[in-house]
Image (cartoon, helix red, strand yellow):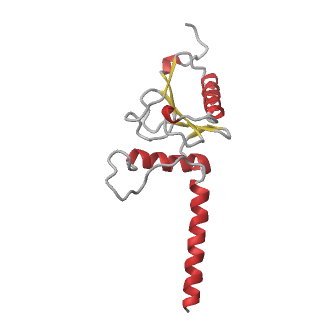
Amino acid sequence: MIFRRIVRFLSVFVAGTVAGGLLFGGLRSRPFLTVERCGTSCLDEKELRGLIGSVITRLAPGLLPEVLLETDRTVAIRHHYPKSPVHYVIIPKKDIKDVGDLAAGDEPYLADAYAVMQSLIEHDQLINYRIHTNGPGYQDVRYLHFHLRADRSAVDTGGED
């Protein structure tokens, strides 16, 4: 009886460790729990959303709503609360918090994100558009992503100027 409990406990522990390694492997460290008062270094709501977003973007991008375009390094979705008629969010599939968190080896993800933006611009025939990203304090989700926005009037319909 005790042997079965020990085996069951060890099985669950090993399975949890393996699942955690698969889900969170390759992510940059983010403080989660600390013994002392952590001030600004603890995981806040934006950090938690970024961590969850990172796992979903990397491992299960199909769970993201309204995916427009996906590559092996980038996913583009329609913004849930658009601030303009055309408002897309382009997300690299690498855990990068913001531009200040960029490191050597991130270049292919940035280049691919811009290639995805170019594809969307060409597909929608956007003429006047804006691309921006936010840093800490301005992000609702602490994960590097780009906004591609345009007005409907900026979409080239093939008509006269």
Find the residue positioned furthest to the top: 161
Q: Position of residue 12 (x, y in %)?
A: 57, 74
Picture layout, residue 36 above or below residue 69: below
Residue shown at 65% from the left, 39% from the top: 73
Find the residue positioned furthest to the bottom: 1
Quadrant position of the C terminus in the picture: top right
Residue shown at 43% from the left, 49% from the top: 48
Number of marks drawn:
0
Q: Nearer the viewer, residue 122 or 14?
A: 14
Find the residue positioned furthest to the right: 72
Quadrant position of the N terminus in the picture: bottom right
**Image quarter of residue 35:** bottom left
Picture layout, residue 130 above or below residue 13: above
Q: Position of residue 49 (x, y in %)?
A: 44, 47
Picture layout, residue 44 above or below residue 86: below
Compared across the picture, whether 13 is left or right of 34 comes to: right
Find the residue positioned furthest to the front: 36
Q: Position of residue 84 (x, y in %)?
A: 44, 26
Residue shown at 60% from the left, 23% from the top: 121
**Image quarter of residue 20:** bottom right
Q: Position of residue 140 (x, y in %)?
A: 40, 39
Q: Nearer the viewer, residue 107 or 150?
A: 107
